[in-house]
Structures are given as structure tokens and as C-alpha cells.
Image (tube, rainbow, N blue to C red):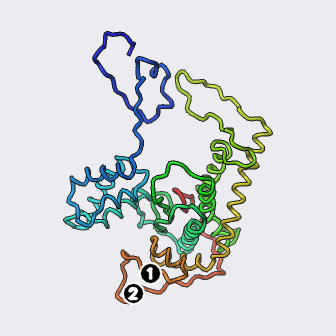
């Protein structure tokens, strides 16, 4: 690595997932000066990776790697290997000889949303609040423009979340428009606004803490990093928040004045308030659909895009294909008391768009 000819013919290969904290001395000419970036696979790459891992397990004829690749944007090679392994485990637990699409869907849900915690006991008031919270996310996400489609809504506790709303992009995305980012902010506030509309401001819980944090981060990045602020224009105001490493400066340099920092805060607040008001307007107009979706979640616990399509079209949601009940077709949807204002225990919000 010293650049002389003593090691001629020897090639040293190293890998890291944090190139930003490497010592600059390592990257000088004659040392590690050839850098190969390995990004996440695109849809074609995911399909080929899945085919490689599927050779190791008995696969049913109904399994389509192309469909799975389309529904797993952002998955790495390790994630896809884990997907096949989890699907095989689900098939083994069900005493099946072949792994079919049902097992792959279960495995995808587990990886994307976390493991189900069905053993966790939730009170009826907590389940009802969670159902309205997640329904708020889903309805706003379906209404605002340029938003990813709603993939699944569930009030089954997963990971640290009491419920979750999953939005699945239809294709790999490399950039995001201002309209799309603001729509994301609106949908993130849908859960908290639904709680306010149904249970009153005094009964709003801490379940939206993660949603608020993410919405604020998107708004701040729009202003300080991506030049999407109409008031401050296409300039970068972000601080260098990278980790300090050998050879890097250990001092923090303030790059904006106090007056500019105040304008940044005002612009962030403006974006947040604008999208909060939009989400509030949507849920106020679609209040009946909010009640219907919350009732469906209370009954089925998990609904997918088919049931959401029915609700948004003003129809009665169809029975989920994987929902098990007696031959009578199941109990009627639980009555929703639109005036009750329970005061459930506070909860800590979990992953994205979750309560």
C-alpha cells in the first residue's frame, strides 16, 4: 500500500458501507484509488437474485419471481435471501411440501413490517384508537396526489408498533418531486388528525411521535438540503453532520446566520402547517369512510388494497381471502360509536406510518 513496486502483482480488495468516514490517506493514488460502488439491485437484479436463492427450496408453480421483485423495492441481496428463507419456514410450519405465494407474502410482511405480536393484549379502547389512527394514514395517502399506493393496513402489533400502514411504491424511485414529498408529509399527519377528529384533542396520544419526527425531517430537508423552499430558494443550508474520524475536522462550523436560521424554521413550519391543514380537510370530508375503515380493521385486524379500494369507492369491504371465521360469514362489523371519547393509555409510536 506504499505505492512502490515491492508488491507488484498483489491486489488488495477491501469493502465498507461507510466510505464517508474513511481516512483520506487510504484513498490516495496508488492505494485504494479504484472504487466500485455496489448499489441496491433494481427490479431486474432482484428477480435474478430471487431465482438464485429459490433453487435451494421446493417452489410451487404459482410463485412468480417477477411479481416478488416488483413488490420488494429497496431490498438488498441479503433481504431477498432472507425472504426466501422465511417463506420456506412458513411452509414448513404449515406442513407444506412446496413453498407458494402465500408463504412469500407472509415472509414479505414479516420483513417489511416486523413480526406479529399476537400475544400482546390490547384493550378495546386501544384497538379502536389504533384502528382510527391507521385508517387516517391510509385515507390521506390514497387521496393526496403522487403518493405510493397503500399496500396493507394492520392493527396487529408488530415490532414496537401497535399498528402499521404500509405504502408500497409501484416502481424503483431515484428522485422525489416536491408534490410527492408534501403528500408524504400529509399522510404522516393523517393518524394524529384522525385521533383528534374522533376522540378529541384531550385524548390524542403519543402514538404519532414517529410520524411527527419523520414529517418534520422531510420538511427540514426540503428547505435546507434539496432547495425545494419557495422562500429560501435553491441553496443548501444544512450543517455537516457526518461522524468525526481521523484526519477530519473536529470543530463544527456554523454556516448560517441567526436570521437565516429563523427563516428556515419559519419555512419548515409553513410546509408542516400547510400539509397538516390539507390532511385535516381530507379526513373531515371523508369522515364516513374513516368510520367504515376503522370498523373493518376492528373486525379483520388486517386489510389490503382490495378492501381499501372498496371502502374508498363507498362500498362494503369484501372479506379478506385469508380471514378465517365460521360458515355464517362472520360477525357483522362492530358498531362504531361516533361520540364516545375514551382515554386510552399512552403508547410510543413505532416504525413508519405506525401507531
With 63 as the anchor, is 207 left or right in this view?
right
Residue 269: % across, % down: 73, 53
Mark 1: secondary structure: loop
Residue 29's disc number? none
Label 2 vs label 1, nearer the camera: 1
Graded by Cα atoms within 10 Å as few (under 14), some (14 to 19) or many (20 or more), the crowding at tag 1 reads some
* Residue shown at the point (68%, 62%) measured from the top left: 276
Using the rendered view, name the quadrant where residue 313 is placed. bottom right
Of residue 39 and residue 216, the one placed in the foreground of this image is 39
**Residue designated by label 2:** 329
Mark 2 surroundings within 10 Å by alpha-carbon count, few (fewer than 14), some (14 through 19), many (20 or more): few
First-in-chain label (2 vs 1): 1
> Which quarter of the rendered picture does the N terminus lie within?
top left
Looking at the image, residue 29 sits to the left or right of residue 6; the answer is: right
The residue at 68%/29% (across/down) is: 253
Q: Where is residue 57 in the image (x, y as percent from the top left)?
A: 21, 56
Which sits in the foreground, 121 or 213? Answer: 213
Question: Which residue does the numbered mark 1 point to in the structure image?
Answer: 318
Q: Residue 183, percent across and down?
A: 61, 60
Residue reaching furthest bottom?
A: 328
As drawn, 239 above or below 166: above
Residue positioned most to the right: 259
Residue depicted at 41% across the width and 67% down the height: 118
As drawn, is 323 to the left or to the right of 182? left
Q: How far apart are marks 2 and 1 (CA)?
A: 11 Å
Image x and y of residue 247, in percent: 54, 21
Residue 158, above or below 22: below
Q: Circle 2 — which element? A: loop
Q: How many labels does the image show?
A: 2
Amino acid at each position: 500500500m506504499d505505492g512502490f513496486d515491492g508488491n507488484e502483482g498483489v491486489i488488495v480488495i477491501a469493502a465498507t458501507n461507510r466510505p464517508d468516514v474513511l481516512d483520506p490517506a487510504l484513498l490516495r493514488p496508488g492505494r485504494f484509488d479504484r472504487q466500485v460502488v455496489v448499489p441496491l439491485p433494481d427490479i431486474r437484479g432482484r428477480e435474478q437474485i430471487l431465482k438464485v436463492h429459490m433453487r435451494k427450496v421446493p417452489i410451487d408453480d404459482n410463485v412468480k419471481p417477477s411479481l416478488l421483485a416488483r413488490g420488494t423495492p429497496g431490498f438488498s441481496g441479503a433481504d431477498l435471501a432472507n425472504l426466501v428463507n422465511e417463506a420456506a419456514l412458513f411452509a414448513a410450519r404449515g406442513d407444506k411440501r412446496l413453498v407458494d405465494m402465500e408463504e412469500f407474502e407472509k415472509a414479505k410482511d414479516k420483513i417489511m413490517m416486523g413480526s406479529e405480536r399476537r400475544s400482546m393484549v390490547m384493550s378495546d379502547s386501544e384497538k379502536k384508537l389504533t384502528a382510527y389512527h391507521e385508517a387516517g394514514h391510509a385515507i390521506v395517502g390514497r387521496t393526496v396526489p403522487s403518493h405510493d399506493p397503500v399496500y396493507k393496513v394492520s392493527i396487529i402489533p408488530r415490532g414496537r408498533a401497535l399498528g402499521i400502514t404500509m405504502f408500497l411504491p409501484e416502481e424503483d424511485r431515484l428522485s422525489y418531486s416536491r408534490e410527492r414529498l408534501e403528500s408524504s408529509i400529509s399522510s404522516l399527519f393523517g393518524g394524529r388528525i384522525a385521533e383528534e377528529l374522533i376522540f378529541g384533542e384531550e385524548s390524542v396520544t403519543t402514538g404519532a411521535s414517529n410520524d411527527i419526527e419523520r414529517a418534520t425531517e422531510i420538511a427540514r430537508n426540503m428547505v435546507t438540503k434539496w432547495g425545494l423552499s419557495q422562500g429560501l430558494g435553491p441553496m443548501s443550508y444544512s450543517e455537516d453532520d457526518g461522524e468525526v474520524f481521523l484526519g477530519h475536522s473536529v470543530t463544527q462550523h456554523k454556516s448560517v446566520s441567526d436570521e437565516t436560521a429563523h427563516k428556515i424554521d419559519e419555512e419548515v413550519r409553513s410546509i408542516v402547517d400547510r400539509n397538516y391543514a390539507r390532511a385535516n380537510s381530507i379526513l373531515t370530508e371523508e369522515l364516513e369512510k374513516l368510520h367504515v375503515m376503522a370498523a373493518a380493521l376492528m373486525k379483520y385486524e388486517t386489510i389490503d388494497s382490495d378492501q381499501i379500494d372498496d371502502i374508498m369507492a363507498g362500498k362494503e369491504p369484501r372479506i379478506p381471502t385469508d380471514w378465517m371465521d365460521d360458515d355464517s360469514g362472520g360477525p357483522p362489523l362492530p358498531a362504531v360509536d361516533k361520540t364516545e371519547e375514551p382515554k386510552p393509555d399512552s403508547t410510543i409510536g413505532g416504525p413508519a406510518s405506525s401507531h
